[in-house]
Amino acid sequence: MKSGYRLGRLFGTLLIAASLAGCGGAQGGADKPAAEQPAAEQNVTPQEANDTNETSVVFLEEEAELADGTYEIEVETDSSMFRSEKCELTVENGEYTAELTLPGEGFSKLYFGSAEDAATAPVDEVYEYRLNDDGKYTFDLPVAALDEELPIAAYGQRRDTWYDHTIVFHAPVENASTEGNAVDAA
C-alpha cells in the first residue's frame, strides 16, 4: 500500500521537476539573477517562496502526517454515474474518515471491495447513507489510503444491484500562501 503511494509521489515530483526544468529554457529567465526569478524557478523552500509573497504549491509527502482537522479534498471515481459532489476528510489521531456526499439518490450503500463480496458482506462492513443538512445522500467512510485507487461497490436501489467501482481520495494540497485547504484544522 505504501510503496504504491511512494511511487506515485515520486513520479509526481519528477513530473513537476521536469516541467519546471523545461520552463527554464531561453525564455525561462536562466540569464536573470536569482532575485529576479520567480520562486518556482529557484531552489527555495515553500516558506522562502511565501516570504517573497509568491504562491507555491506544496504536496504532502507520505511521511508527513496531516494535522488533526477537517479538509476539503478531491475524490476521483471511475464513472459519471457514481461520483462525488463534495468530500471532507477528517483527521483525528492519524485516522482518516471521509464524509462523502453524492449528487443523487441512486446509491444507498457502499462497501470497500467487490460487488460480489458486498452481496454477502457482514452488515458492519456496509456503509449506509444518511441525509445531510441539504437532504443529500452522505456516507461516513474510513479512508485506508490517500491517492490510491480503491475498489468500492455501490448498491443501486432502483435495480436492487451492487455495482463495482473504484474511488481515489486525493490528499489535501497545501498552498503555502494560505496555509493549506483545511476547513477546520485543530
Image (tube, rainbow, N blue to C red):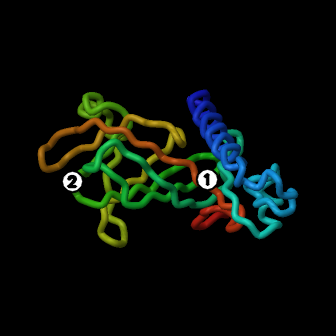
In the rendered image, residue 11, in percent from the top left (x then y), is placed at: 61, 35
Residue under label 1, please give it.
92
In the rendered image, residue 161, in percent from the top left (x then y), is placed at: 17, 40
In the rendered image, residue 111, in percent from the top left (x then y), is placed at: 34, 39
Around disc 1, counting alpha carbons within 10 Å, would you say few (fewer than 14), some (14 to 19), or many (20 or more)? some
At label 2, the amino acid type is Gly
What is the spatial separation of the Cα atoms under label 2 and label 1, in whole angstroms?
30 Å
At label 1, the amino acid type is Glu
Tag 2, which secondary structure? loop
In the rendered image, residue 103, in percent from the top left (x then y), is placed at: 30, 61
Which circle marks residue 49 in the picture?
none
Residue that appears at 28% across and 35% down:
164
In the shown orientation, is residue 37 left or right of residue 58? Answer: right
Residue that appears at 78% across and 61% down:
49
Question: Label 1 near label 2: C-beta < 8 Å?
Answer: no
Residue that appears at 60% across and 67% down:
184
Indicate whether 74 appears above or below 22. Answer: below
Tag 1, which secondary structure? strand
Indicate whether 110 appears above or below 175. Answer: above
Which circle marks residue 106 in the picture?
2
Which numbered mark, 2 or 1, is in the foreground of this view? 2
In the shown orientation, is residue 106 left or right of residue 95? Answer: left
